[in-house]
Image (cartoon, rainbow, N blue to C red):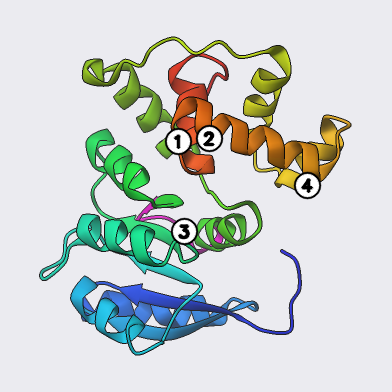
Amino acid sequence: MTKTNKKIQVAIIDDHVLLRAALARLVNSFEDYFVMMEADNGKMLKEEILKHQIPDIVLLDVNMPEMDGYETTAWLHKHYPQIRILALSMLSDEKTIIKMFRLGAKGYLLKNTNPEELQKALDSIVNKSVYLSEYVSGKLVSGLHNDAGSVEAMVVLNEKEREFLRWTCTELSYKEIAGKMFLSPRTIDDYRQSLFSKLKVHSRVGLVMYAIKNGIVEV
């Protein structure tokens, strides 16, 4: 990842104390990251943030007492959209994964993941705003194909917009996508904002989910 003078500040929110402590030691072993906060649940995280202890990334369990992962993600996305949320859970069903992404999570990992993938996910969220593992991508495809209640009206996209969506589903940053499409970063920003409006989504994850659901990219 891009080197900076300041380490990325991480909060770990999980009600399993031993697991949380082990996870904190692991994250602190990564060169560019520092665990600034640990909490048992979303309520404790909210209290610390309101004291201006604001992390860059929140590693968040889904099942917790007093503000679970869903409620915490929704609150963070509404009030502190700059905080990037990486869900880390034992729950592996597509319903849970899709709900977390729709609420504002930028990535989703299972707790049995290896340390290398965790660091890869953190780096991807910092540099590219999203992390989709092969497993999670498969669950998104499965869940969206079975989501009969969310069929959207057909939106007509031109070829450049479709190409942009295909690049969005990779791990390239928006600046790197601009290079691949031989366009300026400003033009890419215009494409992104236009598609946010046209597709009624609010994040890169929303663009990716639209592209997968509508067959623009195959996972």
- Residue occupied by mark 2: 196
Q: Is label 3 or label 4 in front?
A: 4
Residue ID at (80%, 44%): 185
Mark closest to the chain's N terminus, 2 or 4: 4
Q: Which residue occupies the foreground of this view, 57 or 182?
A: 182
Q: Are marks 2 and 1 in contact (CB under 8 Å)?
A: yes
Mark closest to the chain's N terminus, 4 or 1: 4
Between the C-alphas of marks 2 and 4, the distance is 18 Å
Q: Under tag 2, what secondary structure?
A: helix
Residue ID at (52%, 48%): 131
- Residue occupied by mark 4: 175
Label 3 amino acid? Asn
Q: Which residues are magenta?
A: 109-116
Q: Are marks 2 and 3 in contact (CB under 8 Å)?
A: no
- Residue occupied by mark 1: 201
Q: Residue 168: image x %, image y %? A: 63, 35
Q: Is residue 217 positioned above or below 178 on the image?
A: above
Q: Name which quarter of the figure residue 217 lies in.
A: top right
Mark closest to the chain's N terminus, 2 or 1: 2
Q: Name which quarter of the figure residue 36 lies in.
A: bottom left
Q: Are marks 2 and 4 in contact (CB under 8 Å)?
A: no
Q: Callout 4 environment at 10 Å: few (<14), some (14 to 19), or many (20+)?
A: some
Label 2 amino acid? Phe
Q: Under tag 1, what secondary structure?
A: loop
Mark closest to the chain's N terminus, 3 or 1: 3
Q: Is residue 84 left or right of residue 169?
A: left
Mark closest to the chain's N terminus, 3 or 4: 3
Label 4 amino acid? Lys
How many labels, in total? 4
Q: Under tag 3, what secondary structure?
A: loop
